[in-house]
Image (cartoon, rainbow, N blue to C red):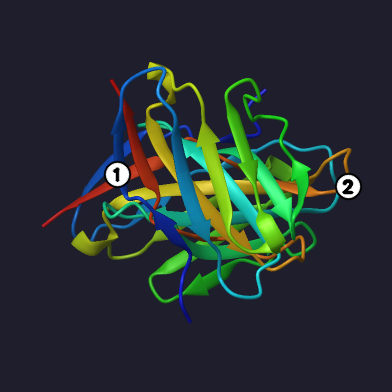
Amino acid sequence: EAGVAQSPRYKIIEKRQSVAFWCNPISGHATLYWYQQILGQGPKLLIQFQNNGVVDDSQLPKDRFSAERLKGVDSTLKIQPAKLEDSAVYLCASSLIFRDREAFFGQGTRLTVV
Amino acid sequence: AQKVTQAQTEISVVEKEDVTLDCVYETRDTTYYLFWYKQPPSGELVFLIRRNSFDEQNEISGRYSWNFQKSTSSFNFTITASQVVDSAVYFCALSEHTSGGSYIPTFGRGTSLIVHP
C-alpha cells in the first residue's frame, strides 16, 4: 500500500515570497490533515478536511495560509506571503473517516524562510 | 491549557535499560482516543498504538507496553530492554470531540529518547 506522498521535501524561500506544498493521501482515506511542526515542538493541526469539505481550520492563519482539496483527493497548502516564523516542517496525514482511526503521515516538507 | 503534556523533554538511557515515557492529558469528553507515535530522524511519524477512553486494559506489544489510567489522566509508554533503534522522538496525542462535531487530534511536545550502545 502506497503511503502519503508529499512534495517538495525541502524548500527555501525569502520572506514575503509565496510557496505551495502538495499532498496525495492514501487511497480511500477520506480525512486529510495538514500539520505544522516547528523544530522541537509537536505537530500543530492547521486544517482538517473530510472529503473536500473543511472540518476544522481554527488554527490556520487565514491572512496568509490557504488550503484546498480538490475532488476530495489531493490537497495543496499555500503560504502567501511567507514570514520568518513560518519556517517549519509541514506534515500531511490521512486517515479513514472514522473518529478513532490513526493517521498516516507523509515525510513532510521542510520549509526555511530566510 | 495544554491538552497533552509530555513533561520529559529528553531521556537518555543505555541499551537494554527499561524506559518509561510519560503522557498526561486533559479533556472534558467521556469519549476520546489516545495515540502514541514515533518520529525517527527521517521525520515521518509512525503510528504505534490507539486506545479509546472506555478501554483501560494495558497493552503489550513485544518490547512495548502501555499503561492507561483514567483516574490520573495518564497514558504512559514503556520500552523494555531498549535498543539503539528505539532512538527517536515519541509523541502522545489526544483526539477529542469538538463543538463542530469532529474529532481533532492534538499532539504533545514530544519526548526525545536517546539510546546509547
Q: CA distance from mark 2 to mark 1?
A: 35 Å
The residue positioned farthest toward the left in the image shown: B117
Kindly tell me whether residue A114 is visible in this rendering: yes
In the rendered structure, the answer to whether residue A47 lies left or right of residue A88 reads: right
Kindly identify the residue that appears in the image at 68 percent across and 47 percent down. Answer: A48
* Tags 2 and 1 on a common chain: no
Kindly identify the residue that appears in the image at 35 percent across and 64 percent down. Answer: B80
Q: Could you say whether the residue bearing mark 2 is in a helix, strand or loop?
A: loop
The number of callouts visible is 2
In the rendered structure, the answer to whether residue B39 lies left or right of residue A22 reads: left
- Residue B38: give x, y in percent of width and height: 41, 56
Q: Residues within 10 Å of mark 2 (few under 14, many from 20)?
A: few
Kindly identify the residue that appears in the image at 80 percent across and 61 percent down. Answer: B54
Provide the residue designation for mark 1. Answer: A10
- Residue B11: give x, y in percent of width and height: 30, 41
In the rendered structure, the answer to whether residue B104 lies left or right of residue B92 reads: right
| Disc 1 residue type (three-letter) | Tyr
Q: Chain of mark 1?
A: A
In the rendered structure, the answer to whether residue B105 lies left or right of residue A110 reads: right
Provide the residue designation for mark 2. Answer: B101
Q: Could you say whether the residue bearing mark 1 is in a helix, strand or loop?
A: strand
